[in-house]
Every structure is written in structure tokens, then in C-alpha cells.
Amino acid sequence: MSTNTPCPQCSMENTYPDGANYVCADCGYEWPMQEAAGADASADAGDVVKDSNGNVLADGDSVVLIKDLKVKGSSTTLKVGTKVKSIRLVGGDHEVDCKMDAGNFMLKACYLRKV
């Protein structure tokens, strides 16, 4: 069997090298061999989530809202200065998962400041 990396687009392992690129036989996607090697190294480093001041956030940190945030689909507003304890970092556009008195929310780190 070949030791080629799976396709980043369709995740199938039916790939082959073609010059300086890998090619997926299933979907036809091509990507450079150097990018595949760099992706493995960056996955080990992990994603770093930073607050509005550039401080690195971690699971269990306490943060404060720096802006009033309207909750989509509700009349609730999360007020500036609200302290949130023991956050949890998750992937995606909204990096922080937290529990508040108003409920459970997914927040963007750019609206938070580490305490």
C-alpha cells in the first residue's frame, strides 16, 4: 500500500503523487506535497486562541465581556463587564463555549478580555 496522505477535500485515501503534487483519484483535487508536510507540523502545534488584548486563552480561564453583545434570535443582551468563569475552548468561528446566568453561549474571543 502507498503511504500517501488522504485528500484534504474529500478525505479519501485514493491519492497518488504527480510531479510536485498529490492528486486525488476520486474527486480530482490537487495539492502540493510541501503543503501536506507543513499541515502535519502545524496540527501538532495546535491552534492558539487569543483574547482582545492578545493574551492566550486556555480551558478554565475567567474572562470579561468588552462589548454589549445581542443574542441572535432573542431579545437578550449580554452586557459589557459581565464576568464569565471557566470557559471551554472549541474549534470553529466562535472559539469559546461558556455558561452564564442567561444560558449557554458560544462567543468569539475578540469580544473577551482575560481576567
Image (cartoon, helix red, strand yellow):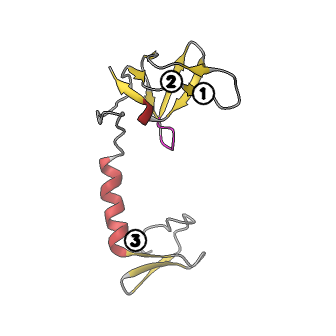
Residue type, mark 2 in image: Cys
Q: What secondary structure is the stretch in magenta mostly built from?
A: loop
Q: Where is residue 11 in the image (x, y as percent from the top left)?
A: 54, 63
Q: Where is residue 87 in the image (x, y as percent from the top left)?
A: 44, 24
Residue type, mark 3 in image: Thr
Q: Is mark 2 on a helix, strand or loop?
A: strand
Task: Identify the image quadrant of the N terminus.
Answer: bottom left
- The range drawn in magenta is 91-95
Q: Is mark 3 on a helix, strand or loop?
A: loop
Would you place residue 61 above or below residue 89 in this image?
above
Residue type, mark 1 in image: Lys
Label 3 sits on residue: 3
Classify mark 3: residues with Cα within 10 Å, few (<14), some (14-19) or many (20+): few
- In the picture, measured across the screen, residue 5 lies left or right of residue 106, that is left
Distance of label 2 from label 1 (alpha carbons): 16 Å
Of pointers 2 and 1, the one earlier in the residue sequence = 1
Q: Where is residue 8 in the image (x, y as percent from the top left)?
A: 49, 65
Name the disc covering residue 70, or none.
1
In this view, the mark in front (2 or 1)? 1
